[in-house]
Image (cartoon, helix red, strand yellow):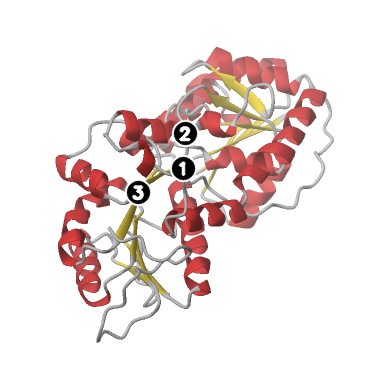
């Protein structure tokens, strides 16, 4: 495929007789306006792409499967897969995009159609993590191999697309999440025995791997050690009744607050107010919530699995524990709650050393390298 001028997103040769902008970028995503790491990644990726396109006087159109219609440049289809596919392909026929960013591996099955409609479109498929762990459908696998590039968001996910799905190393370009620095307030002084523990996750049955139940099972022993401990869980979904029932059986309902879905400002406040962030998830492509906690100077507890290690460095900015082990989770929380100096050291290291590596400016610079063909084997 034609890679275009160095530093430009557009193709090298103009389309004679066709009036067009200097560059057109189409983005296919599952969802934008919802809570969740994938949605946050989509928003930041779109923002970075928009700034690159604006620099070149071009146009960007987003096709979102699950969102409602929003504007001519952000087209939602209310979960209608047929209308989503029809609109994306029809628009491609008339607009002939220079770049196509496929925001979910499952949409890679559309790439043969794009190749047929407009062979010179450069296509890039985002890979998060869990969706590339297993066997892909033949059409998805074909599209993934056909793409100009694959954009894994962690080293763990990059390894998966190389080892399991046959993507050549030179076409797998790491594109880490990037976010803006947050204002950080000093830790809240509390009397001993009153730690505040926080988890933020989707609470759907299909996402039970997030490990909220593992943390709940660690709480009875922790509550005996720390009489004032409070555990707040942010998120909603159809697994919530099971988790409520589990807290009741464990006799810890009075120590647990299921906060549901909260607004951005309330979420900011909860991050600031907590002492320890815990998410013993076994299938994270990266785990953006760990980074959000680190940005507030909080120590984090995670699992030695998946892309978590891209963000959490054991004994540096957090503690990594064993899979599905309430004892291991409880031991890590107990250690942190008993050692304020350790909490401060881990939190400060994460804020000072980890967070800058995931700055939005870095994501935008990296995306520019990839889309303009100026990246090497990174």
* Residue 156 at least partly seen: yes
Mark 1 vs 2: CB contact within 8 A: yes
Q: Position of residue 199 (x, y in %)?
A: 57, 36
Instruction: Report the residue at 35% width, 31% height from top.
Output: 160
Of marks 3 and 2, the one in the foreground? 3
Near mark 3 (Cα within 10 A), the count class, few <14, some 14-19 or many ≥20, is many
Mark 3 vs 2: CB contact within 8 A: no
Instruction: Report the residue at 48% width, 64% height from top.
Output: 7
Instruction: Please give the residue where the numbered disc 1 appears in the rendered image.
Output: 174
Instruction: Please give the residue where the numbered disc 3 appears in the rendered image.
Output: 149
Task: Tell me which numbered mark, 1 or 2, is placed earlier along the sequence.
Answer: 2
User: Residue 315: which quarter of the image?
Assistant: top right
Classify 186 as above or below 124.
Answer: above
Near mark 1 (Cα within 10 A), the count class, few <14, some 14-19 or many ≥20, is many
Near mark 2 (Cα within 10 A), the count class, few <14, some 14-19 or many ≥20, is many
Element under disc 1: loop
Q: Is residue 150 left or right of residue 298?
A: left
Residue in the foreground of this view, choosing between 236 and 314: 314
Q: Position of residue 86 (x, y in %)?
A: 18, 67
User: Residue 34: which quarter of the image?
Assistant: bottom left
């Amino acid at each position: 495929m034609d890679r275009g001028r160095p530093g430009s997103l557009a193709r090298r040769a103009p389309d004679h007789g066709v009036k067009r902008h200097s560059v057109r970028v189409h983005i296919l995503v599952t969802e934008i306006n919802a809570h969740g790491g994938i949605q946050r990644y989509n928003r930041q990726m779109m923002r970075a792409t928009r700034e690159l396109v604006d620099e070149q006087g071009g146009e960007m159109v987003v096709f979102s499967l699950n969102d409602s219609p929003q504007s001519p440049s952000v087209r939602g289809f209310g979960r209608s897969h047929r209308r989503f596919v029809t609109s994306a392909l029809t628009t491609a026929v008339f607009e002939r995009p220079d770049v196509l960013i496929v925001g979910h591996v499952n949409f890679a099955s559309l790439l043969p159609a794009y190749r047929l409609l407009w062979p010179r479109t450069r296509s890039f498929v985002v890979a998060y993590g869990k969706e590339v762990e297993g066997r892909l459908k033949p059409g998805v696998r074909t599209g993934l191999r056909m793409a100009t590039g694959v954009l894994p968001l962690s080293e763990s996910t990059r390894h998966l697309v190389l080892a399991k799905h046959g993507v050549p190393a030179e076409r797998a370009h790491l594109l880490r999440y990037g976010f803006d620095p947050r204002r950080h307030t000093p830790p809240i002084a509390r009397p001993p025995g009153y730690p505040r523990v926080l988890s933020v996750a989707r609470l759907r049955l299909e996402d039970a791997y997030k490990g909220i139940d593992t943390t709940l099972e660690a709480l009875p022993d922790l509550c005996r050690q720390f009489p004032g401990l409070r555990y707040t869980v942010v998120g909603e979904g159809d697994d919530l009744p099971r988790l409520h029932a589990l807290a009741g059986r464990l006799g810890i309902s009075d120590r647990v607050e299921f906060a549901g879905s909260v607004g951005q400002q309330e979420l900011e406040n909860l991050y600031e107010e907590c002492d320890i962030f815990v998410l013993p998830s076994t299938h994270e492509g990266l785990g953006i919530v760990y980074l959000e906690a680190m940005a507030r100077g909080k120590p984090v507890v995670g699992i030695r699995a998946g892309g978590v290690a891209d963000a959490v460095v054991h004994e540096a900015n957090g503690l990594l524990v064993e899979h599905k082990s309430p004892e291991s989770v409880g031991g890590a929380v107990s250690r942190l709650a008993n050692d304020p100096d350790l909490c401060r050291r881990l939190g400060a290291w994460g804020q000072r050393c980890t967070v800058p590596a995931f700055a939005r400016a870095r994501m935008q610079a990296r995306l520019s390298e990839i889309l303009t063909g100026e990246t090497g084997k990174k």
